[in-house]
Amino acid sequence: MNYKHKIFLFIVVLIWNVGIYPGILFFIDNNSIAAIPLLNKFYSGVCHQHDIKLLKILGFNSMVCSRCAGIYAGVLLFSFYMIFVKIKTNKEIKFLILSAVPLILDVIFYNIGIYNYSKTAAFTSGLFFGSAGIYYFYIGLEKLISEQKIKEKL
């Protein structure tokens, strides 16, 4: 994947992440507060948005729960990292499975009552999973681009 593709991917992920935190938009432009109902509706398609599980930043609730925010933050951080570092394409899926273990355990332990909901645990487990998820998305995108180049040569 060339540098332009990496930058484009990062910008798309950055825009997605900025939309999660309406407080950031409010500080960019006071009129952007009018977009909150639209953002809320938009992000409700990807997250349950239970009030108790939302992050509060700059006086505004995030548009997604702590776990989803962690996933998207992991995607953002790793997509930024990928701009500067050549990623080795390891096709084994064990890294993705291992990164999902803390997330799955957190969900199970909370749901069976071993401990109360922790925004920190949810965010952190999501962060690991999001970082691994974008890695595999990146590999798939890289494969798609290389296959397209082969077709163009034919």
Image (cartoon, rainbow, N blue to C red):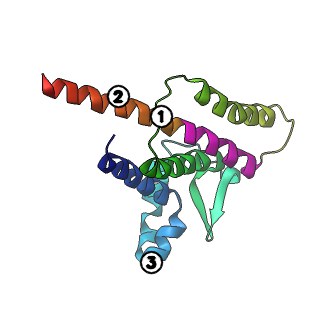
> Three-letter amino acid code at disc 2?
Lys
| Residue type at tag 1 | Lys
Please give left or right for residue 99 compared with residue 20 in the image: right
Q: Which residue is mark 2?
A: 143
Report the side of 22 relative to 124 (left or right). left
User: Label 3 neighbourhood size at 10 Å, few (<14), some (14-19), many (20+)?
Assistant: few
The residue carrying pointer 2 sits among few (fewer than 14), some (14 to 19) or many (20 or more) residues within 10 Å by Cα, namely some
Secondary element at image label 2: helix
Quadrant of the drawing holding the C terminus: top left
Please tell me whether residue 141 is drawn above or below residue 12 in the rendered image. above
Q: Residue at x 47, y 60 (%)?
A: 18
Q: Which residue is mark 3?
A: 30
Residue 105 belongs to the span the image colors magenta: no
Q: In which quadrant of the rendered view does residue 14 lie? A: bottom left
Q: Magenta includes 122?
A: yes
In magenta, the rendered stretch is 118-132
Q: Which mark is residue 88?
A: 1
When asked about the image quadrant of residue 39, the answer is bottom left
Is the N terminus in the top left, top right, bottom left or bottom right quadrant? top left
Of mark 2 and mark 1, the one earlier in the sequence is 1
In depth, the one of 18 and 147 nearer the eye is 147
Give yes or no for contact between labels 3 and 1 (Cβ–Cβ under 8 Å): no
Residue 149: percent from the left, percent from the top?
21, 30
Label pair 2/3, CB-CB below 8 angstroms = no
Q: Is residue 35 above or below residue 67?
A: below
Choose the circle earlier in sequence order: 3 or 1. 3
Q: Residues within 10 Å of mark 1 (few under 14, many from 20)?
A: few
